[in-house]
Image: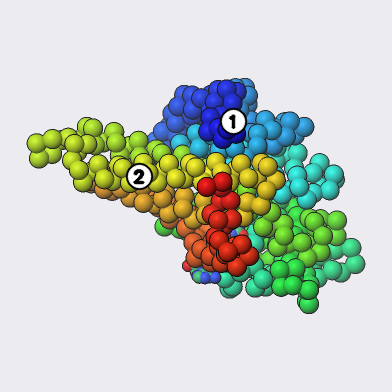
Amino acid sequence: MAIDFSFPPEIEELRLKVRTFVDEVVRPAETRIAEREGDRRFLVDEIIKMRAEAYSRGLWLPHMPAEYGGMGLGHVAMASVSAEAARSSFGPFALNAQAPDEGNMHTLLHWGTEEQKKKYLVPLCKGVARSCFAMTEPEVAGSDPTLIQTRAVLEGDEWVINGHKWFISGAEGAKFAILIARTEDEPEVPQAGNSAFIVDLPSDGWEIVRDVHTMSGSHNHCEIRIANLRVPRDNMLGGRGDGHKLGQARLGPARLAHCMRWLGQAEMALDMMVDRSLNRFAHGSLLADKQGIQWMIADSAMELYQCKLMILHAAYKIDRGEDFRSEVSMAKHFVANSLGRIIDRAIQVHGALGYSTDTPLAKMAQQARWARFADGADEVHQWRIAQRTIDAYKKDGTTKAATGGLPL
Ligand SMILES: Cc1cc2nc3c(=O)[nH]c(=O)nc-3n(C[C@H](O)[C@H](O)[C@H](O)COP(=O)(O)OP(=O)(O)OC[C@H]3O[C@@H](n4cnc5c(N)ncnc54)[C@H](O)[C@@H]3O)c2cc1C
């Protein structure tokens, strides 16, 4: 039997190392940072210390190959590392495996020329630069990149770009952006109208209008005005019309990387739910002894189990070079929704304490809300999953191939 749900000993050892690192270094730093909220200098110092400690413990850049100073982990191994790291919101950043840089590193590794890798990928890997990814626009549906209005026109050896973007994570302080803009007037297929560019930052013509304030506060998701921005011809990433392909190639693994981090958050919420139920007494017994609470715990445990299996299977398919689109879509949809439900149940079990900001649950609930529409809205994933399921039935007379292609 080839099916084996255990990790090789070295990956299990690594998972435990990340767990210890988060408990010993990251969570205490997170508490200190929360106590000095608004003190930017203190935040930066703490982050530098966390990163230095991660580096010295051999926990740096888990997703990149060794030639770039990384640990060379595949997606299955990354699932164990990311889920552990995400038990603190600073965990992925401490390992230099945070969004959007993680996705941008994969994109540059896959699509960049040697020159582009040297200039843009190497500093990201060393942790001396950050980046952002600029695709979404306020005027048109982000779910449909064929509607992108930002335009790039070739003038001599430069692309001149005009447009408007928003929700560009990490834009403030980024050393460069990967920008998606329309270059083709009559593409063969609508998906081939856009191209990708690397934009050095700051640049004339790239104006950060504001950090868009969200329901969970300001997190450097910026609105950008682009006016006569000039980008050297050689800064196109991939070829003309490859913008959509590049976005999709980036988003598949990046969506799964989100799922891995959400898993860590969902597990933390379930741990908190159970811990609270074992320590809160009402109406003659502990909450843990009450069936209404046990149902919430059971539902959450079952969902978390499904999340883990879906993530591992999708990661396994990516590692094997198989078509992973349906599995990543299903995982993205299911994990995003489970995350919201599990955190909400944890809040319920904590009562007023859960609604307060004395526990991380309130922040986690606000953060979890975007998971259902960013990087592919629920309904778009459902649409694609349904399409593939119907196609499988039409082709094979059974939907089997669309439900993970498993031997069951
Ligand atoms: C925290 C956060 C960080 C982000 N970071 C980045 C970033 O770094 N770079 C970047 O470029 N973008 C970023 N985004 C933007 C994100 O990718 C978009 O929000 C997403 O693509 C959806 O686009 P939209 O918001 O324009 O919603 P729309 O496309 O307008 O969709 C709105 C709703 O319409 C429905 N809908 C859409 N299409 C369909 C359909 N076919 N069938 C049925 N219903 C449908 C869905 O319910 C969807 O939620 C970020 C967003 C958030 C919230």
x and y, in percent, of residue 236 in the image: 80, 58
Specify few, some or many for label 1: CA neighbours under 10 Å numbering under 14, 14-19, or 20 or more.
many
Left or right of residue 1: residue 112: right
Asked if ligand 1 lies within 8 A of label 2, the reply is no
At x 20%, y 43%, the residue is 291
x and y, in percent, of residue 163 in the image: 68, 69
x and y, in percent, of residue 132 in the image: 65, 52
The N terminus appears in which quarter of the rendering?
A: top right
Rendered position, 163 above or below 96: below
At x 58%, y 64%, the residue is 397
The tally of labels here is 2
The residue that label 1 is drawn on is 51
Q: Quadrant of residue 196?
A: bottom right
Pick whichever of labels 1 and 2 is earlier in the sequence.
1
Query: Relative to the observer, which residue lies in front, 285 or 3?
Result: 3
Q: Which mark is residue 341?
A: none
At x 78%, y 55%, the residue is 237
Q: CA distance from mark 1 to mark 2?
A: 33 Å
Q: Quadrant of ligand 1?
A: bottom right
x and y, in percent, of residue 32 in the image: 43, 32
Helix, strand or loop at mark 1: helix
Helix, strand or loop at mark 2: helix
Residue 364 visible from this viewpoint: no
Identified by mark 2, the residue type is Ser
Q: Quadrant of residue 109?
A: top right
Specify few, some or many for label 2: CA neighbours under 10 Å numbering under 14, 14-19, or 20 or more.
many
The residue that label 2 is drawn on is 300
Q: Mark 2 and mark 1 in contact (Cβ < 8 Å)?
A: no
Rendered position, 382 above or below 277: below
Please identify, in this view, whether the residue under mark 1 or under mark 2 is nearer the observer: 2
Identified by mark 1, the residue type is Arg
